[in-house]
Image: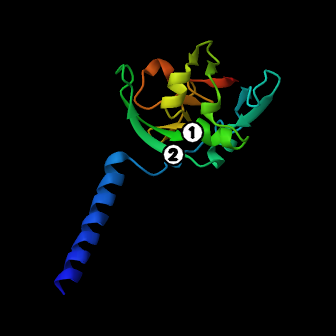
Amino acid sequence: MCRINRLIRSAVMLAVIAVVTVVACGCGVDDIDISGYSDEQIVITGIDGTDDSEEIVNISQLKALDCTTVKTHSTSDKIGEVRATGPTLDTLLQQYGASQRDFSRIEIYGRDGYDIALSQKVIEENEIILAFGIDGEPLDDDSVPCRIIIPESDSAYWIRMVDRIKLIK
């Protein structure tokens, strides 16, 4: 009987720890209303390793993928803490038989003219989220169609208005 009681107590304790972890980490996926920008497109070039390849995905397609909601903050503290919702770049690339680690460089472009190139080290060591929602809300007009979030990184990588991603082998 003592052994059963210990097993029950252990199971209850594990359940409590799991619930506390989920609540504390902001786990789960926020349901974001993307109706205002669901048809906005992102052009992705180089998936097959050539400059000639081009895939176009819209935000509805991104939302239909396996998404995550991650609570994170920028290491530069310019933005503070955010809860980003969207698929990872790897999840999107899997649809085409690729992984972000297949590329030595990834260039990300925003409609506002801002762009950044991610080095192989950044690509290999980080999850890249294609966020269509921030803090449980749709993106504002100054951020659509998508925002790149690289958890626990400098906010210089957190590009808004992403409309083009170039993958380089």
Q: Is label 2 in contact with label 1 (beta carbons under 8 Å)?
A: yes
Instruction: Give the amino acid at mark 1.
Output: Thr
Label 2 belongs to which residue?
68
Does dot 1 land on a helix, a strand or a loop? loop
Q: Position of residue 164 (x, y in %)?
A: 68, 23
Q: Is residue 8 left or right of residue 166?
A: left
Q: Residue at x 55, y 41 (%)?
A: 86
Instruction: Give the amino acid at mark 2.
Output: Thr
Above/below status of 34 relative to 11: above
Q: Is residue 71 left or right of residue 126?
A: left
Mark sitting earlier along the chain (2/1): 2
Q: Is residue 107 left or right of residue 149?
A: right
Picture quarter with the N terminus: bottom left
Label 1 belongs to which residue?
88
Q: Residue at x 42, y 25 (%)?
A: 153
Q: Position of residue 124 (x, y in %)?
A: 53, 30
Q: Quadrant of residue 6?
A: bottom left
Q: Position of residue 42 (x, y in %)?
A: 70, 29
Picture quarter with the C terminus: top right
Does dot 2 land on a helix, a strand or a loop? strand
Q: Position of residue 28 (x, y in %)?
A: 45, 52
Q: Quadrant of residue 87?
A: top right
